[in-house]
Amino acid sequence: MAKKAVASLQTGSKRLTKAIKMVKSPKTGAYTFVESVMDPTLVDDFLKK
């Protein structure tokens, strides 16, 4: 289960996106959040993992 939260960040001439997804731990069943700053074209691949 992934929660899609995407914010656009601009640093100089590069355009970056911060993606946050919620991941359920198989051991405990608790949810954790995984964050990553990346190019906007890579967001879909990050969320599908």
Image (cartoon, rainbow, N blue to C red):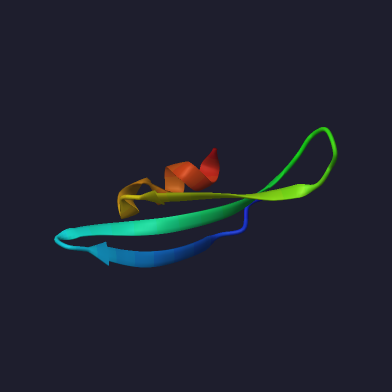
Image side of residue 42 versus residue 3, left or right: left
Look at the picture and state if 44 lies above or below 15: above
Q: Position of residue 10 (x, y in %)?
A: 26, 65
Residue in view at x 58 percent, y 52 percent:
21
Q: Position of residue 3 (x, y in %)?
A: 62, 58
- In the rendered image, which quarter is residue 20 located in? bottom right
Look at the picture and state if 20 lies above or below 30: below
Image side of residue 27 versus residue 33, left or right: right
Q: Position of residue 17 (x, y in %)?
A: 36, 58
Q: Residue furthest left?
A: 13
**Where does the C terminus fall, quadrant-wise?**
top right
Image side of residue 25 versus residue 11, left or right: right
Q: Which of 40/10 is in front?
A: 10
Residue in view at x 44 percent, y 42 percent:
45
Q: Residue furthest front?
A: 12
Q: Position of residue 18 (x, y in %)?
A: 42, 57
Q: Which of 12/44 is in front?
A: 12
Residue in view at x 16 percent, y 62 percent:
12
Residue in view at x 30 percent, y 57 percent:
16
